[in-house]
Image: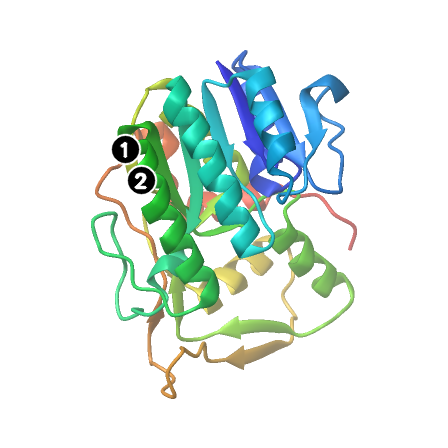
Amino acid sequence: MKIIIFGVSGTVGKALTKTLTVSHHDVYGSYHLNKPSFLPSGRTIQLPIGELDVLEKFLSQVNPDFVVMALRGDFVKQLKFHIKTAEYLRNTGGRMIFCSTSNVFDASTESPHFEEDPPSAASDYGQFKVECERVLAEILLDKLIIVRIPTLFGHDTPRTNELRQQLQDGESIKIYSNLYSTRNTDQLLSMQLTYLMEQGLTGIYHLGTTDIMNHSEFTKKLLTRWGYTDVAFEVLMQDTFSSVIPERYDNSLLTNNPLPHKLQINHEQLIEYLSMIKFAR
C-alpha cells in the first residue's frame, strides 16, 4: 500500500514508518520543522497545516491508499486540514486512520471507557478531538479508523526521555496517587496500526494495555526495574475540571474490540520492555 503519515517526525510517525517499511509498504510523510532522516527526501514534504493548496497537490501526487493523521498544531487549521484530506479520500476511495486520545472522555473520569461509550470532554483538546472524530466519520463513513491512544512509552519517546533526564539530574519525580490509566508502547502501537490497515478494518479501537495501573505504582515499578532504589517522590493528586479532587481519576481506555493476542500487552510486559533501555547512570 501507499501510505501518507501526516506528522511523520513525531512519536507515532517514527515508529509506524519503521514497521510499515519492514512490511514492504510505500511510506510518505509530512513534517513541520524536523525533517525526518529515516525516509528518503523524495518521500517527505515540509507541510505547514495551513497550506491546503500544497496538501491537495501532495495528495494528488501520491494518491495514497491510506492516510494516517498524527498531527499537532492550531486546532482550527488542523480541522480544515483533516476535512480537506477526508474529502479527497472520499473521492478516491482511500482510507484514513485518525489518532485520537483518552481526553475525549476527560469530563467523565469515574471509570474506564470502552469504544462504544459516548465521548464526554471538558478540555479544549478533548473537545477538539471529539469534533474531529465526528466530522471525519460523517465524511468517510466506513473508510475511517479512529484509534484512541493513551500515554506512550518507548526506548526513545518524550515521556520516557523526560523521566530519564529527571533521574539523571537528581530531581524529585512526580507521582499521582489517584490517577489510574492504561498505557502503550510506540513499537506495539505501530504494529497495531499496521494490522488495522492490512486487515481493512474499520470503526473505533482503544489501543492500550489490557490492564489498568495506578500512576504511582507504575512509576515506582519502572524505576525499580531501571535500578533506582533511592528516589525522591513528590506525591500529588490529579485534579479534574471541577473544584473537587477525586479519590480515583480514571482515564483508562479499555477495549471490546481486542486485537490478536500477539498485539496485546499488559503493564508487566510493558515494564519489562522498558527495562531493556540502556542509559548512563
Task: Give x and y (percent) for residue 222.
Answer: 55, 56
Give the left or right position of residue 114, taking residue 235 as reference: left
Location of the C terminus (image quadrant): bottom right
Spot the residue most to the front. 53
On the image, the x and y values in percent for residue 65 come to: 45, 18
Tell me if I can see residue 76 in this picture: yes
| 63 is higher (above) or lower (below) than 169 | above
Query: What kind of residue is marked 2?
Result: Ala
Residue appearing at x 56%, y 39% in the figure: 12
Residue depicted at 50% across the width and 19% down the height:
64
Q: Where is 21 relative to 186, above or below? A: above
Q: Which residue is mark 1?
A: 141
Q: Is residue 160 above or below residue 45?
A: below
At horizontal 65% and vertical 62% (from top left) the residue drawn is 228
Q: How is the image coloured?
A: rainbow
Q: Which mark is residue 137?
A: 2
| Residue nearest the viewer, comparing 22 with 116 | 116
